Image (cartoon, rainbow, N blue to C red):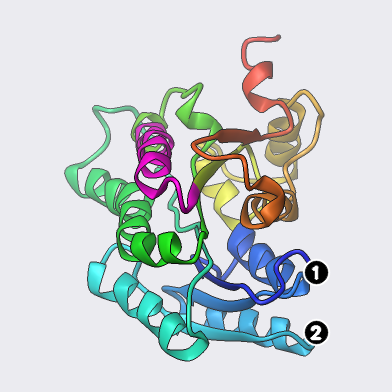
Amino acid sequence: MRLENKVAVIVGAGSGMGRCAAIRFAQEGARVVVGDYNEEAAEKVAAEVRAEGNEASARFVDATKGADVKAVMDFAIENYGKIDIVFCTAGKAQTPSMIWELDDEEFDRQIAINSKSAWLCAKYSALELKKNHGSLILIGSTGAIRCRATQGTYGACKAFNNTLCIGMAAELAPEARCNLINPGPTATPMLATFARDPYSEKVEAQIAGGTLLGHLVDPMDVANMALFFASDESRSVTGVSVLCDAGADKSRGRN
């Protein structure tokens, strides 16, 4: 059991990568706090974890609000005695739009959900993670490295997370670690919202065909990478941003 006796808080765990991480971490022995803005979805994921004989609790959390993020961290400490792992997967796709089409409200939402959430998770878990020699895991995007038209703000938010990872690695050291995963096109409900054209099987096939490996990233692929960062197997790895994108970043401009 790679996470035996560890406590993990996953923010944004009601679906997609966060859901898979909750299931995967629990399978490896962690007690998991499933945090999400959609309380019903969080409860459903926690029930999935418990159905496999593992331990999980669901909590409402608006990852853009400091009081909510602090509350979910406090809940974990009060109920499980500590926090060893924090994985922030909260995110929102940018409505496909050029900068002159993007309104101020959408910009503010992008910053809050994609960047501030990571900052808040780091802020309210850092001292606890240092105390327990823990692991903070953040989410970026291939778009942070090779951004494309209509996604400039989203890419900038995820680039913030990449830089935050480096800063947090320094601030958590030497006791704890921080690493980041940059997913590419991932088979989650959020993928459809990136497309400018109406989403269809044809559009999905085009997106998958745009990667070197010719397939979408499975959210469990991201969860397994997060598991490595959460476990002691990565005890000598910190401040690292890793791609999990089926080669999407390398394929842009190939054809």
Q: Residue furthest left?
A: 104
Instruction: For the C terminus, give its image quadrant.
Output: top right
Left or right: where 204 falls relative to 214 = left
Q: Residue furthest front?
A: 174
Dot 2: what SS? loop
**In-front residue for pair 104/64:** 64
**Tag on residue 1?**
1
Residue 108 drawn above or below residue 148: below
What's the residue at 40%, 49% (across, down)? 172
Question: What is the x, y in percent for residue 88?
Answer: 47, 58
Residue 147 visible? The answer is: yes
Q: Main secondary structure of the magenta part?
A: helix
Left or right: where 44 falls relative to 70 = right
What's the residue at 67%, 57% (across, down)? 231
Instruction: For the N terminus, give its image quadrant.
Output: bottom right
Residue 29 drawn above or below residue 197: below
What's the residue at 62%, 10% (across, down)? 253
Sort mark 1 into few (<14), some (14-19) or many (20+) by Cα contacts within 10 Å: few
Q: Which amino acid type is shown beneath numbered disc 1?
A: Met
Question: What is the x, y in percent for residue 232?
Answer: 68, 55
Residue 76 drawn above or below residue 150: below
Sort mark 2 into few (<14), some (14-19) or many (20+) by Cα contacts within 10 Å: few
**Tag on residue 131?**
none
**First to last magenta residue range:** 155-177
Left or right: where 61 falls relative to 14 = left
**In-front residue for pair 191/250:** 250
**In-front residue for pair 37/239:** 239
* Residue 168 inside the magenta-drawn segment: yes
Q: Which amino acid type is shown beneath numbered disc 2?
A: Glu
Task: Name the residue beneath numbered marker 2.
Answer: 52
